[in-house]
Amino acid sequence: FELGLLSGRHVLINAGPTREAIDPVRYISNHSSGKMGFALAEAAAEAGARVTLVAGPVNLPTPPRVQRIDVTTAVEMLAACEQALPADLFIASAAVADYRPAQCAPGKLKKDTTREDGMTLHLVRNPDILATLATHARRPAYCVGFAAETDDVLGYASDKLTRKNLDLIVANDISQAGIGFNSDDNAVTLIDRSLTPQPLPQASKQKLARQIIARIAQHLNPPA
Ligand code: PMT
């Protein structure tokens, strides 16, 4: 891992979950801890980049020399990412909620004692942050997505690479114990537009982050 690999570059990374309010005390979210994205931010800063890290609600210290912007919802995360443009590289490691409650109830929702069968919550689609930035008028030169999948991991990941107009996708098999959401380790497969999968075996998220940043830097600085 070479220091200075990304010097002079602005790297934008999002990390962690988003939180979508149902009422003042309840929300929809997921188990993302932010560890993968924070490790990527740290590795990019070590590689000499200026790093903007847009973080959902997580419990992690900000890596050295990283500019962190805290957000809660997917809509806020999109706005913060757009505001951080232009960037040379965008890495979308956040686990963005695909849907949010159509409205946040102004007061705490009460149990409906007249209905024993349950209740229905109306959800609406959230914006796709990665697809928005990857087709933006100020599109970062290199856009990287993650794909958290349980079945046909490489198939769905390749699909997202094409559909979201990406340069690289990091396929993350979240059906395996000990990797993925909230663990200290991960194991991923990188797929670029040549569609040749490159597996990176299980390691700490810090070690994998350095491998991913080194690989991306090769694309940004092709040999003369
Ligand atoms: O945070 P950790 O605990 O360390 O866990 C890391 C991780 C498992 C969350 C991470 O490695 C990971 O896989 N992140 C992506 C999780 C995810 O939501 O994947 P997806 O397949 O649903 O989304 C595909 C891509 O589109 C992702 O880059 C995601 O950031 C992006 N997306 C998805 C939906 C949406 N509305 N907007 C988006 O930008």
Image (cartoon, grey):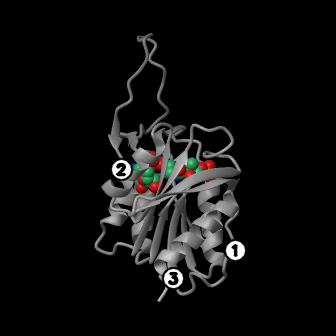
Q: Please give the label number shown on residue 159.
A: 2
Compared across the picture, whether 68 is left or right of 221 comes to: right
- Given residues 51 and 207, the one toward you in this image is 207
Q: Closer to the N terminus: mark 3 or mark 2?
A: 3
- Given residues 176 and 200, the one toward you in this image is 200
Amino acid type for the residue under numbered disc 2: Asp
Mark 2 Cβ inside 8 Å of ligand 1: no
For the residue carrying disc 3, how many other residues have a C-alpha within 10 Å: few (<14), some (14-19), or many (20+)?
some
Task: Give the structural element (helix, strand or loop) at label 3.
Answer: loop
Compared across the picture, whether 145 is left or right of 134 comes to: right
Kindly tell me whether residue 78 is visible in this rendering.
yes
Q: Which residue in the protein does label 3 denote?
A: 9
Task: Give the structural element (helix, strand or loop) at label 1.
Answer: loop
Q: Closer to the N terminus: mark 1 or mark 2?
A: 1
Looking at the rendering, which quadrant does residue 51 occupy? bottom right
C-beta proximity under 8 Å, tags 1 and 2: no
Q: Which residue in the protein does label 1 denote?
A: 64
Residue 41: where, in percent of width, then height?
Answer: 60, 68
Q: Exactly how many numbered labels are in the figure?
A: 3
> Which label lies toward us, 3 or 2?
2
